[in-house]
């Protein structure tokens, strides 16, 4: 659900290094600085904007995705309810965008930055490691946000506007899952020797997270569901369903307070995965090329 990953050229190193050296580069930063992240993120975003084809594909694919699946839903017969199909399509779009734009593309980006010594050079400046990870993630997060906004607009236009029973839960899902996937991308980049090998190292996580999300493949029932509810993308799908439609897994309508109660487990799952991803990134992320 994204354009081909945009990897930096060697020439872009100077742009990143220049942004990182603003201020006093002779000492380590004492705290996370939004100013430094913004400076680096600006350079990252410029790299994306220079690739017009990748940018167009990343933006255009969202309404095309909705158009394709809304057409399919219209051929399913009289039981194809637009009020049900729309939120389901948005859940699918969110899963695809988060996994491919954020997790997969960021994994390849971190590997490319490392192999071209961009990360090593930036660390000699005043930026900290969390700031470098956050800045590199900004373009991917912006693309994901644009895709979801355009997807919602396309669903509202082609099918029916989702009722948005509790939009707070949708925001909570995105706020918790995006840093989780950024950190997982950092961890996966550490076991990927090259950009090409990242296509293989990300495959197991993509397959497992997609299958257990519950929005792409039919639910397996029984033990499958018991395992799936403790995976991050299934938690995101649950929060999207509660936030968009205000219904439980069986389709029963819930009051506003009940949606918050139902959201307790998915939120706890995402918080646990955020902690695991943070540990994995600290354990496996590499900042210099592997020899």
Image (tube, helix red, strand yellow):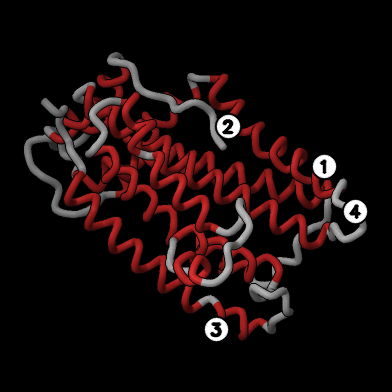
Looking at this view, name the residue that lies furthest to the right.
78
Q: Is residue 255 left or right of residue 26?
A: right
Separation of residues labelled 1 and 4 (CA atoms): 12 Å
The residue carrying mark 3 is: 261
Please give the name of the residue rendered at 76% of the width and 50% of the height, measured from the top-left corner.
Answer: 155
Dot 2 falls on a residue whose secondary structure is helix
Along the polypeptide, which appears first: circle 3 or circle 4?
4
Which of pointers 3 and 2 lies earlier in the amino acid sequence?
Answer: 2
Q: CA distance from mark 3 to mark 2?
A: 35 Å
Mark 2 neighbour density, 10 Å: few (under 14) some (14–19) many (20 or more): many
Residue in the picture at 63% in, 71% down: 242
User: In x, y percent, where is residue 117?
Assistant: 19, 24
Left or right of residue 149, residue 129 in this image: left
Q: Position of residue 272 (x, y in %)?
A: 34, 68
Kindly report which numbered mark, 2 or 4, lies closer to the viewer in this rendering: 4
The span from disc 3 to disc 4 (Cα, nearest Å) is 34 Å
Mark sitting on residue 77: 4
Against 172, is 127 above or below? above
Which residue lies under the disc numbered 2? Answer: 58
Instruction: Name the residue nearer the viewer: 209 or 150.
Output: 209
Q: Residue at x 32, y 19 (%)?
A: 12
- Residue linked to disc 1: 71
Q: Nearer the viewer, mark 1 or mark 4?
A: 4
Q: Earlier in the sequence, mark 1 or mark 3?
A: 1
Question: Are the two marked residues, 3 and 4, in contact with CB atoms closer than 8 angstroms?
Answer: no
| Alpha carbons under labels 2 and 1: distance apart | 21 Å
Instruction: Judge depth for marks 2 and 1 and give the one in front.
Output: 1
Give the mark, 2 or 4, whose residue is nearer the N terminus. 2
């Amino acid at each position: 659900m994204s354009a081909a990953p945009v990897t930096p050229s060697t020439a872009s190193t100077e742009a990143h290094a220049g942004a990182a050296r603003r201020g006093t580069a002779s000492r380590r930063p004492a705290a996370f600085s939004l100013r430094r992240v913004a400076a680096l993120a600006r350079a990252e975003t410029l790299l994306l904007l220079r690739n017009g084809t990748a940018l167009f594909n990343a933006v255009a694919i969202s309404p095309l995705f909705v158009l394709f699946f809304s057409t399919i839903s219209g051929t399913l017969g009289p039981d194809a309810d637009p009020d049900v199909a729309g939120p389901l399509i948005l859940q699918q779009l969110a899963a695809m965008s988060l996994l491919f734009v954020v997790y997969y593309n960021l994994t390849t980006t971190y590997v490319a930055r490392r192999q071209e010594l961009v990360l090593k050079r930036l660390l000699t400046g005043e930026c900290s490691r969390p700031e470098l990870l956050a800045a590199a993630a900004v373009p991917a997060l912006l693309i994901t946000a644009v895709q979801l906004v355009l997807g919602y607009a396309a669903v509202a236009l082609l099918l029916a506007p989702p009722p948005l029973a509790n939009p707070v839960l949708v925001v909570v899902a995105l706020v918790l899952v995006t840093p989780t996937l950024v950190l997982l991308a950092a961890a996966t980049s550490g076991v990927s020797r090259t950009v090409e090998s990242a296509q293989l190292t990300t495959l197991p996580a993509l397959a497992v997270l997609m299958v257990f999300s519950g929005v792409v493949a039919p639910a397996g029932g029984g033990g499958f569901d018991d395992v799936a509810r403790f995976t991050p993308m299934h938690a995101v799908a649950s929060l999207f369903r509660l936030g968009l439609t205000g219904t439980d897994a069986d389709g029963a309508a819930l009051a506003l307070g009940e949606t918050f109660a139902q959201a307790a487990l998915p939120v706890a799952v995402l918080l646990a995965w955020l902690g695991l991803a943070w540990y994995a990134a600290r354990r496996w992320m590499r900042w210099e090329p592997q020899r």
